[in-house]
Amino acid sequence: AQSVSQHNHHVILSEAASLELGCNYSYGGTVNLFWYVQYPGQHLQLLLKYFSGDPLVKGIKGFEAEFIKSKFSFNLRKPSVQWSDTAEYFCAATGTASKLTFGTGTRLQVTL
Amino acid sequence: DTAVSQTPKYLVTQMGNDKSIKCEQNLGHDTMYWYKQDSKKFLKIMFSYNNKELIINETVPNRFSPKSPDKAHLNLHINSLELGDSAVYFCASSQAGASDEQFFGPGTRLTVL
């Protein structure tokens, strides 16, 4: 069965610290990978996506993610977080159909 | 301009009632979705329509019935509401491809008392 897992449920960082959020997927065949962010009280917004080509993907707000096929991973990174990055982060995937399967989410809390 | 809009934003109702949530997108997308986000923030797809045709129907009680009058609208009707239906319901839309970004609405927080 297709699945996405995020092992970090709650991460607390100080401003300017580096961030890496883990995401692993289990899909047979073609996979498209996404990171979405949900700021408090808001809807989901796309940070970045990978569907082919360069496995290092750059997104909005200084975020990037690396697709490592051998590890079935798509970890999200940011070199220096800001207080405004406090949010819930969701890794998600589709196969050949457009049905998004989400991970359980990681709550990021950035302290001043 | 709001790309994907939902009404109402909040919905508080009694057990056993029937309620509807409306969704509209002005992006010209072919595909629309309903997702449920539970109290632990877990998101799960419920339904997907492509050009008014149902293409994804996850294991959802048949009390939930989506309706797509045209490809810009996808409404969700829920009969005989139960306590466990309390959640945030998100509508989304995308072009038809699996690699296409899905654009989400602001969500409808449903509370069943």
Image (spheres, grey):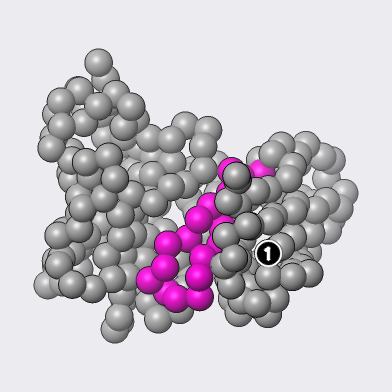
Would residue A48 appear left or right of B82 to someone viewing this image?
left
- Quadrant of the rendered image containing residue A20: top left
| Residue numbers of the magenta segment | B92-108
Q: Where residue B76 sits: x, y (%)?
A: 74, 59
Residue under pointer 1: B72
Q: Where residue B93 sits: x, y (%)?
A: 56, 62
Looking at the image, which residue sits at the far front?
A: B1
- Kind of residue at badge 1: Ala
Crowd class of label 1 (few under 14; some 14 to 19; many from 20; radius 10 Å): many
Question: Secondary structure under badge 1?
Answer: loop
Q: Where residue B15 sits: x, y (%)?
A: 83, 45
**Residue A16 to residue A56: above or below:** above
Q: Is residue B6 visible?
A: yes
Look at 51% across and 65% down and name the residue there.
Answer: B94
Looking at the rendering, in which quadrant would you find the C terminus of chain B? top right
Looking at the image, which residue sits at the far right?
A: B17
Look at 48% across and 60% down and name the residue there.
Answer: B102
**Residue B3 to residue B101: above or below:** above
Label 1 marks which chain's residue? B
**Residue B100 among those drawn in magenta:** yes
Q: Where residue A64 sits: x, y (%)?
A: 20, 50
Q: Which of B57 and A65 is in front in this view?
A: A65
Q: Is residue B87 visible?
A: no
